């Protein structure tokens, strides 16, 4: 478990192998509830190669001095990320 937002990571090892590799991250909010966006790659079990980048939006709650993941939403492709970006741009323009 992580005690600070800066320690949170998407990296995940299984049997000594890095199966989820974090490429980048942005902390959107800090505090009792933290929101972090990760850009990462999954490792293909058959080939050992890392796949196309994905994006994960994760919410963490600080309990007993440590952050615990509460929710996770994964954007599974850059095409889907672009669609979401375009949608958000439209909505923001409507509310401006």
Image (spheres, rainbow, N blue to C red):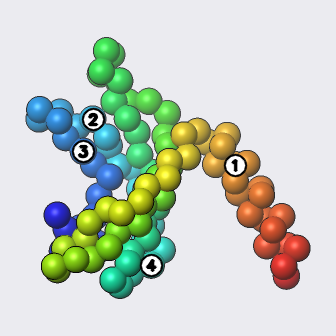
Q: Which mark is residue 29?
A: 4
Q: Quadrant of residue 14?
A: top left
Q: Which comes sooner in the sequence, label 4 or label 3?
A: 3
Q: In the drawing, does residue 15 fall left or right of residue 26?
A: left
Q: Residue at x 19, y 68 (%)?
A: 2
Marks 1 and 4: CB-CB under 8 Å? no
Number of residues whose C-alpha sits closer than 10 Å to that of mark 4, classed few (under 14), some (14–19) or many (20 or more)? few
User: Which of 80 and 72 lies nearest the eye of the viewer?
Assistant: 72
- Name the residue carrying label 1: 82
| Image position, residue 96 (x, y; %) | 85, 82
Outermost residue toward the bottom in this view: 31
Q: Which comes sooner in the sequence, label 2 or label 1?
A: 2
- Name the residue carrying label 3: 12
Q: Which comes sooner in the sequence, label 1 or label 3?
A: 3
SS for dot 3: strand
Number of residues whose C-alpha sits closer than 10 Å to that of mark 2, classed few (under 14), some (14–19) or many (20 or more)? some
* Vertical order, 93 against 74 (above or below): below
Marks 1 and 3: CB-CB under 8 Å? no
- Name the residue carrying label 2: 19
Q: Which comes sooner in the sequence, label 3 or label 2?
A: 3
Q: Residue at x 36, y 63 (%)?
A: 70
| Image position, residue 47 (x, y; %) | 33, 16
User: Which of 4 and 21 lies nearest the eye of the viewer?
Assistant: 4
Q: Residue at x 27, y 35 (%)?
A: 19
Q: Which comes sooner in the sequence, label 2 or label 4?
A: 2
């Amino acid at each position: 478990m992580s005690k600070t937002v800066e320690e949170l990571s998407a990296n995940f090892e299984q049997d000594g192998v890095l199966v989820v590799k974090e490429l980048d991250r942005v902390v959107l909010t800090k505090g009792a509830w933290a929101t972090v966006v990760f850009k990462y790659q999954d490792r293909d079990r058959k080939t050992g190669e890392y796949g196309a980048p994905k994006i994960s939006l994760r919410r963490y709650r600080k309990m007993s001095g440590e952050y615990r993941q509460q929710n996770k939403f994964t954007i599974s492709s850059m095409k889907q990320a672009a669609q979401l970006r375009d949608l958000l741009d439209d909505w923001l323009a409507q509310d401006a």
